[in-house]
Image (cartoon, rainbow, N blue to C red):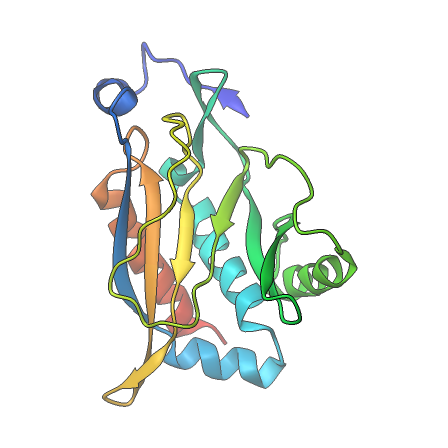
């Protein structure tokens, strides 16, 4: 974690404009083509949840703006951001929050995520840090828009990613996907970069 020098930071003005907004977080929903990606992970026998969390986190980690956070009221940037996702317990129909450190390869990540999820018996393991991407899958509905609970904390800058039920259209498998971010750090252009980068990764995954 490195503190940002506001005197030389190119986003300093934009950061200040949105810093004290009543609702500085905003959410964007769009579709992703997962036709190739779904085929390949099924061939490998990977959990879609684990594989997709890795794919999104890998791409988001490569975009600087998605690694900014607040720490003690000041802007900081993390060198690497890890993952935290909800996972449904089938018997109780209650979710637990599973935290998994980001790995260099999808294979290593999926293996680690499987082990941690199986070994975790509690729903919540404690307060989450800032150095994570949050995921909250919503695979029962093919949504076109989604909103989230608001804690009232204007310094909550952890990006939140959701996806819905995928479906077929014109021979392609499409996935509803949403990104919630803090406007002090992430603008529309950065969500656009993530969309393009992630789609390329899904298309070329082999």
Using the image, determine if residue 140 lies above or below residue 132: below
Q: In this rendered view, identify the residue nearer to me: 25 or 12.
A: 25
Quadrant housing residue 54: bottom right
Q: Give the percent coordinates (x, y) of residue 95.
A: 59, 58
Using the image, determine if residue 86 lies above or below residue 158: below
Q: Residue furthest front?
A: 92
The residue lying at 49 percent from left, 45 percent from top is: 133
Q: Is residue 193 left or right of residue 205?
A: left
Q: In this rendered view, identify the residue nearer to me: 115 or 23.
A: 23
Q: Give the percent coordinates (x, y) of residue 103.
A: 63, 53
Q: Give the percent coordinates (x, y) of residue 176.
A: 32, 67
- Can residue 10 be seen from the camera position used here? no
The residue lying at 51 percent from left, 81 percent from top is: 40
Q: Residue furthest top?
A: 7
Q: Is residue 86 left or right of residue 14?
A: right
- Can residue 164 be seen from the camera position used here? yes
The residue lying at 58 percent from left, 33 percent from top is: 129
Quadrant housing residue 200: bottom left
Q: Residue furthest bottom?
A: 171
Quadrant housing residue 10: top left
Q: In this rendered view, identify the residue nearer to me: 21 or 46.
A: 21
**Split into 4 quadrants, where in the image is the N terminus?**
top right
Q: Is residue 203 left or right of residue 124?
A: left
Using the image, determine if residue 162 lies above or below residue 130: below
The residue lying at 41 percent from left, 33 percent from top is: 157
Q: Is residue 54 left or right of residue 139?
A: right
């Amino acid at each position: 974690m490195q503190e940002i020098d506001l005197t030389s930071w190119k986003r300093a003005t934009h950061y200040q404009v949105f810093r004290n907004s009543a609702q500085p977080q905003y959410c964007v929903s769009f579709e992703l083509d997962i036709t190739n990606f779904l085929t390949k992970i099924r061939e490998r026998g990977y959990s879609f949840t684990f594989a997709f969390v890795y794919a999104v986190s890998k791409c988001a980690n490569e975009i600087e703006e998605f690694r900014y956070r607040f720490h003690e009221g000041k802007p900081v940037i993390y060198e690497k951001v890890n993952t935290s996702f909800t996972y449904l317990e089938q018997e109780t129909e209650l979710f637990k929050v599973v935290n998994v450190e980001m790995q260099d390869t999808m294979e290593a990540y999926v293996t680690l995520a499987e082990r941690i999820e199986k070994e975790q018996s509690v729903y919540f393991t404690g307060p989450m840090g800032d150095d994570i991407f949050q995921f909250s899958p919503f695979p029962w509905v093919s949504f076109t828009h989604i909103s989230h609970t608001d804690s009232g904390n204007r310094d909550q800058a952890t990006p939140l990613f959701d996806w819905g039920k995928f479906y077929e259209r014109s021979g392609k498998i499409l996935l509803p996907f949403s990104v919630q971010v803090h406007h002090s750090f992430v603008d529309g252009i950065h969500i656009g970069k993530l969309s393009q980068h992630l789609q390329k990764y899904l298309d070329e995954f082999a």
